[in-house]
Amino acid sequence: MAFDHHLPLPHTDGMPLLSFNTPLPALADALTRLFDAVARSLVRVGEEESS
């Protein structure tokens, strides 16, 4: 099972790809929820927004 998550970057054309996979099909539903939660929890740091 593979799960790809594209993350749009504000103010750019960039779109990094997170790719997760597991060889355990029996856990596909639970791992898909986990992978989605990980992808949604990412926060950009190190760049201040201009006012």
Image: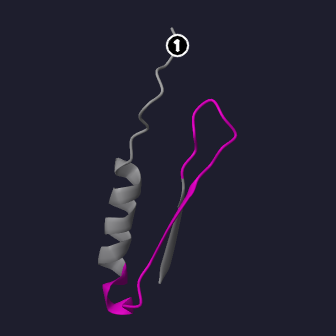
Reading the image, the residue beneath label 1 is: 50
Q: How many marks?
A: 1
Query: For residue 21: magenta?
Result: yes
Question: Measuring 39% from the left and 90% from the top, which residue is drawn there?
Answer: 25
In this rendering, would 26 be left or right of 48?
A: left
> Where is residue 8 shown, x and y percent of the image?
58, 44
> Where is residue 35 shown, x and y percent of the image?
37, 66
Residue found at the far front of this picture: 46
Question: Measuring 63% from the left and 29% from the top, which residue is drawn there?
Answer: 11
In this rendering, would 30 be left or right of 6?
A: left
Location of residue 26 (image quadrant): bottom left
> Where is residue 33 shown, x and y percent of the image?
33, 67
Residue found at the far top of this picture: 51
Query: For residue 30: magenta?
Result: no
Location of residue 38 (image quadrant): bottom left
Residue found at the far right of this picture: 13
- Kind of residue indicated by mark 1: Ser
| Vertical side of 6 occupied by 23: above or below | below
Question: Measuring 38% from the left and 47% from the top, which residue is drawn there?
Answer: 42
- Stretch in magenta: 7-28
| Vertical side of 48 occupied by 23: above or below | below
Q: Nearer the viewer, residue 12 or 45?
A: 45
> Where is residue 50 shown, x and y percent of the image?
52, 13
In this rendering, would 9 be left or right of 38?
A: right
SS for callout 1: loop
Question: Measuring 37% from the left and 82% from the top, which residue is drawn there?
Answer: 28
Task: Give the crowd class for mark 1: few <14, some 14-19, many >=20 residues within 10 Å.
Answer: few
Color scheme of the displayed model: one colour
| Vertical side of 42 occupied by 20: above or below | below
